[in-house]
Image (spheres, rainbow, N blue to C red):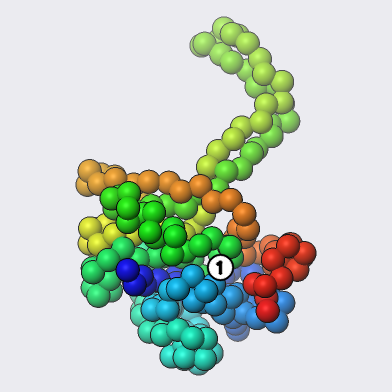
Amino acid sequence: MTYKAVIMAGGEGTRMRPFTHTIPKPLLPLGRKPIGQIIIERLRACGIREIIMALGYRSDLLRAYFQSGEQFGVNIRYFVDPARLGTAGALAYLDDLDAAPFLVTNGDILTDLDYARFLEEHTASGAALTVAVRTAEMPIPYGVMELEGDRVKGVREKPVYTYQFNAGIYAVSPEARKLVPRGQCFHMTDLINATIAAGLEVRAKELSGLWFDLARVDDFEKALHQIEQHYPDLLS
């Protein structure tokens, strides 16, 4: 099956200012390449060559850099969000995605995930939506009280809580895409809840290996250091 991918690249990147005052975040460099280019080259390496970039902030610069995608071995077309429709709002206008499940990734997520395999597993599962998740731990630096009203039942000294969080990558089937309303701000978290409310199956896929949400300046520095040590092919 031939899969397509949507890169959500319309945000202003406010946490990266002052750099993003003039440059959209997908064009900020990680080593010698913009993060958006690294994502596109990873998609191509996984066999995904049909890409839609959902743009907003500084769409002119992104279109000028990536153009048709031919120079990166892919075909890119664009949807320009005129009204800040949120991280899922653009999907309502992409009717040609109704033929098969497709990938959605935030435009600042760097990973070594095999995107095509992720989509294949989603398709085989029969789910309407699969959310990539990561596991993290949060140490609590206090004794956590276990209470029943004002009665103390016990205490756990400095416990560590484990939780799963949204990793910003999704496999979306047409029946889930159709739940995105036109003309209003709608985020991927809204789509997850709407899909569940519609009685459709939403699955989670645990990600191991490389994953970075490049939200702040020090995230770029940490990512570059780890990639140069363990994943140099991503930057070549």
Residue at x 51%, y 47% (from the top left corner): 206
Residue at x 38%, y 79% (from the top left corner): 50
Is residue 125 visible in the rendered structure shown here? yes
Left or right: where does residue 104 sit relative to residue 98? right
The location of residue 38, given as percent across then percent down, is 59, 75
Is residue 193 visible in the rendered structure shown here? no
Q: Where's the C terminus, which quadrant? A: bottom right
Residue at x 33%, y 60% (from the top left corner): 172
**Residue placed most toward the observer, 8 or 24:** 8
Please tell me whether residue 36 is drawn above or below residue 143 in the rendered image. below
Residue at x 63%, y 17% (from the top left corner): 145
> Which quarter of the picture shows residue 109?
bottom right
Which residue was labeled with disc 1? 108
The location of residue 197, given as percent across then percent down, is 25, 44
Left or right: where does residue 234 sit relative to residue 108? right
Please tell me whether residue 2 is drawn above or below residue 204 in the rendered image. below
Mark 1 residue crowding within 10 angstroms, few (<14) / some (14–19) / many (20+): many
> Which quarter of the picture shows residue 104?
bottom left
Callout 1 amino acid? Asp
Q: Circle 1 — which element? A: loop
Left or right: where does residue 55 sit relative to residue 129? right
The location of residue 181, given as percent across then percent down, is 24, 63
The location of residue 170, given as percent across then percent down, is 41, 58
Left or right: where does residue 210 sit relative to residue 47? right
**Residue placed most toward the observer, 141 or 192:** 192
